[in-house]
Image (tube, grey):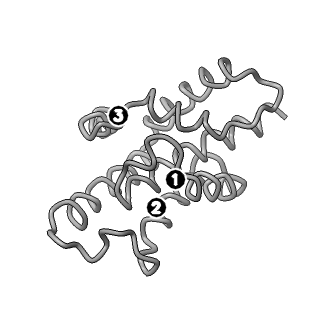
Amino acid sequence: MFEIEHRLEDRGIRRKDIIASAMELYVSHGIEAEEAAGLLDAKIGRAFEDPNVSSLLLGAMLLEDELYWQRKNSEIADDPVFLLSDEIIGMAIAEVIGGTYARFEFARYDHKKPGILSKLGPFLDDAIAGLIAGCTSRLYSESA
């Protein structure tokens, strides 16, 4: 949907890097890490096909381009505490995929920023954290 995976790749955000970031905070629920990575890969692929998830990811990309990359000395360059829309996008993505529990998983990934999350700007780090949180939360719920 919206060529979202290709648009992310154009920004250097590859699915394998998203999965690697997810696995840094993976908590085993009776599923070995290798199998969990495969299941997450499939869940991320399905999420990319969801018009709600894809449109939120696209929104994060466009906001980051407009408000972060295209402005010299941007007032949001350091992801200030008054910027909340990035968090809202990330939580929305997490909840669309994984429901209310995914909000708590989002907080873990948002706080630790493992892997590629630490290299992204203020909107995409939260959007991708939301994608990871929704998919991992769903994986945990389905394995229980």
Q: Is mark 2 on a helix, strand or loop?
A: helix
* Residue in view at x 26 percent, y 57 percent: 62
Chain-order first, disc 2 or disc 3: 3
Q: What residue type is labelled 1?
A: Ile
Disc 3 residue type (three-letter): Glu
Q: How crowded is mark 1: few (under 14 residues within 10 Å), some or many (20 or more)?
A: many
**In whole angstroms, how far apart are the C-alphas of marks 2 and 3?**
17 Å
In the foreground, 118 or 9? 118
Q: Which mark is on residue 93?
A: 1
Indicate which disc residue 89 carries: 2
**Badges 2 and 1: C-beta atoms under 8 Å apart?**
yes
- Picture coordinates of residue 79 (x, y %)? 39, 69
Q: In this view, does 33 lie to the left or right of 56?
A: right
Tell me the number on the disc at residue 5. Answer: 3
User: Residue at point 38% right, 53% down?
Assistant: 124
Between 118 and 36, which is closer to the camera in this rendering? 118
